[in-house]
Each structure stands twice: as C-alpha cells, then as structure tokens.
Amino acid sequence: MRVEIWSDIACPWCYIGKARFEKGLAAFAHSDEVEVVHRSFELDPNQAKGETAQVIDMLAQKYGRTREQAQAMEANVASNARSEGLGYLVEGRDHGNTFDIHRLLHLAKARGRQDELLGLAYRAHFAEERSIFEAEVLVDLAVAAGLDADEARAVIADENAYADDVRADEREAAELGANGVPFFVFDRRYGVSGGQPAELFTQALEQAWQGREIITPLAEDAGVCDADGACEVPPSGARA
Amino acid sequence: MRVEIWSDIACPWCYIGKARFEKGLAAFAHSDEVEVVHRSFELDPNQAKGETAQVIDMLAQKYGRTREQAQAMEANVASNARSEGLGYLVEGRDHGNTFDIHRLLHLAKARGRQDELLGLAYRAHFAEERSIFEAEVLVDLAVAAGLDADEARAVIADENAYADDVRADEREAAELGANGVPFFVFDRRYGVSGGQPAELFTQALEQAWQGREIITPLAEDAGVCDADGACEVPPSGARA
C-alpha cells in the first residue's frame, strides 16, 4: 500500500501530523508493506522569495490580532507538538517562501533520502530556530540527510531544478480535492486530512488495507459464465 | 490506467467480451494510456485433466436438457458472437480442463505475448474445431503467438510451471468478489461483469478514468493548515 502525504514545511500540523502518522503506522500490522511518499504543497506561494518575517508578526498582521493573541494561537499548537515529544518554538521562527525547500525535497526523493530531509527540515524550522530560508542551512540539512553538498547547492541555485515536480504535486493535490495540509492519501482511494491522532491513522491504514479489494460495479452483470460453469444469455439490452 | 480481465478460455462470453471490450477500448479517448492484463479463472476446475467431452453433450447432461435444447442455448450465444464478426461452432467443440492453457498464458504474459495467445486460443477453440486440450495444438498456438516451441512444450509438460500464478489470479478473483467471468477490473477500483456491449465498455472506461482521482475521506478533517495559510486548532478529540 502506498501512502502519499502532501505537506508544507512551514505547516505546524504537517510537522505534528508526520509524527502522529509515524506512530500510527508503527502500530499497523502491515507497516512493512507501506511505502510513504511526501508531496509538495505551498501554503503561501505568493510570499516573496528572499523575504522573511517573524511568524508571530505575520500571524498578527494576517488575522488582525494582537501579538499576544497570535502567541496564544501558537502556544496551543505548541502544546500539541510537545505532547508528541516534538520541540516547538512559539517565538523566533521565520515565515518565508518554501518553494526551494520543496525542490530540494524532490532531489532527496530521487536519492532515497526524502523522509530524512523532511524530518530534519521540520526540526530545524520548528524546534531549532534555524532559518530554512537560507541556502546554507538547507545545504547543511541536505548533507545531514545523506545528500551531496555540491549537488544540493546546485539544485538550490537553479530555480528550475525540480520545479516541475513541485508544481505537478500541487496540481495533483488540487485534482484530488485537497484544500489544506497535511493531506494523507492511501492507494489513491482514501484520504485523511489533518494532523490527526496516531490511533486515527492506524484505523485509517486498516480501513484502507481492507478497502484495497473493494471494486465498485459500473454496470449490471450481463453475459456472464458463472463459477458453476453456466453461461447466461444476457438481456436483449446487452446484445450489441 | 490498468484493466485486468479475468476469463476462462472455455467461456463463450469471455470470447465475445474480449472482442467487445477491444471495440469499446478503441473508441475511448485515452486508449493509448490503457494497459490490459489477462488473468486466469477456471469455470470447471474439477473437470478431469486429459478427459474431454463434446460441449453440447456436456451442456445437455449438466442442465438436464435435451441435445436440441443445448443446441438452442449455444445457437443463441453463437448469434451474439457472429454479431461481433466472430466465428462460433455450435457443434464440435471439446469441453475439458483449462489449467494447462492458463499456465501457458502466464508464460506468454512473461514474454509479452499474452493477448496474442489468448486471441488465437479463443479462435482455435470457438471457431476452428481445434482441441485446445491437446498439447501439440497448444504448442502450435504458442508459436503462432510468437513464443518459442520448446519453451512452450516444457511449460505444458511441467505441471508446476506457472501453476502458482494461475492460482494467485483465481484467489484474487475471489477476493475481489468475482463469481463469474469475464470480469473486468479498472485500476482495482471499478468493475464490469460480463461480455457487455462495446459502448458500455467505452462508458466504463470513461467513468473509471474520471474516478481515478476520487478520494474517499476516512475521517472528519482536523488539524489542518489551509491553502489560505491559516492553521486551525483541532477539536479536543483530535488532540493526542
């Protein structure tokens, strides 16, 4: 079974959801038959490249709240993160354009290191006050994930590298009806939206596993030889 | 899109259904993006190997009919076949065990000649009064389909060759709920049972094509950052 997870690196629920999904997956009986693929989704594609802001300031401005209200929103998300054993900085995080990081995650996918890089990038962004919007931080993360520094640097520098892959993922998300992230899709049949509890992911994996074999009939049966060997003559409508 | 077709070589509706499906596929806009895989199904696995009977006699005996009634049943099927431009012998066909032919079709699949061999075997059986229950007839058909004669002969002689593949196909048919053939499955999501009219196959292909992207949600959304960049706090039930 294949699970595709659309997420944005700047999305707190994606960070939390990844940990909860992994916990849910560990409790799933067929976990070793599950392949996980991460897909790109930008929450704020219009954020100017090269410009960053502090997350709290951005939230306050975007939603017309005071800094204190924005901090309370973040503190709530932080408590969810910490309940999963994840570090979470309420203050000090940068908000910026994530397109380059998504491109780099596609390089990592091609090298079999996508999950590693995504995990490291989440930690850097949410728990370590390192700016994932700086090229050299990204190169460091790429190397820590097992990628080649020069190759990572070249991909970051070439704005066309893996750009089509990022856009293809985003187009697919839209086609599948995703309007937010994280968005988990099981065998392109079933979906779960959000950083849900681990137990819900285990249940979803079990349902999707059972549902792999469910075939929806597109027509009434006609012109069938049955397992008993009998061949029925179809109703006249079924004759060409 | 992948279409799997479960069928038995001795099944008249499979023979007719193959022709109708192909006609329906030819009228489908994305036909060049469709991969067809044939899968094994035995309508009469308990028929003793090496023993054959005349089809009309078998039908009369099996259903407690007179030979004339059995001929009338067959004549009806024959008229369906002929309306598709297919030859069909009402008298003179053998009934027998099809396990070896299914094994040989798996060899043909491995060599990329499955569709060719199936088409030739149907024609031999239904239109040409050649007994597909004789090893040398099967070897001739295999060669005509582009297979190597010695390899085909070796597979026919070794009753274990591709036997597991035949049984795996049959187990899958049972898991998918097929109780007769032909059984057409589109991307393991949608099914059509029977040798239906060509137009119905075209419609089914169109429906399955549209439906490729339909994702069934397994839970209410919770813990989502939406495309607007807003991150909702989930209801308390969604907190781990």
Image (cartoon, coloured by chain):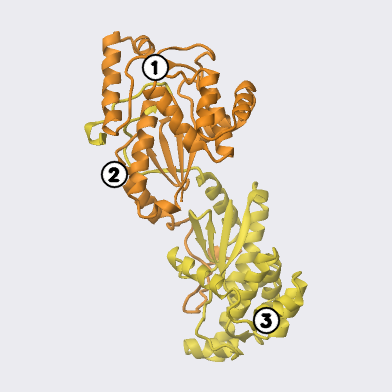
Chain colours: A yellow, B orange
Tag nearer the camera, 3 or 2: 2
The answer, for residue B35, to whether it is visible in the render is yes
Say which mark, if any, is on residue B199.
2
- Residue sitting nearer the eye, A20 or A113: A113
Distance CA(mark 1)–CA(mark 3):
78 Å
CA separation, marks 2 and 1?
30 Å
Circles 1 and 3 on the same chain: no
Q: Are marks 3 and 2 in contact (CB under 8 Å)?
A: no
Chain letter of the residue beneath label 3 in the structure image? A
Splitting the image into 4 quarters, where does residue A50 fall? bottom right
Q: How many marks?
A: 3
- The image position of residue B111, as x and y in percent, is 58, 39
User: Residue beneath label 1, please?
Assistant: B93
The crowd level at tag 3 (other Cα within 10 Å; few <14, some 14-19, many 20+) is: some
Nearest the camera: A228 or A206?
A228
Given the image, what chain letter belongs to the residue carrying mark 1? B
Q: Which amino acid does label 2 sit on?
A: Glu
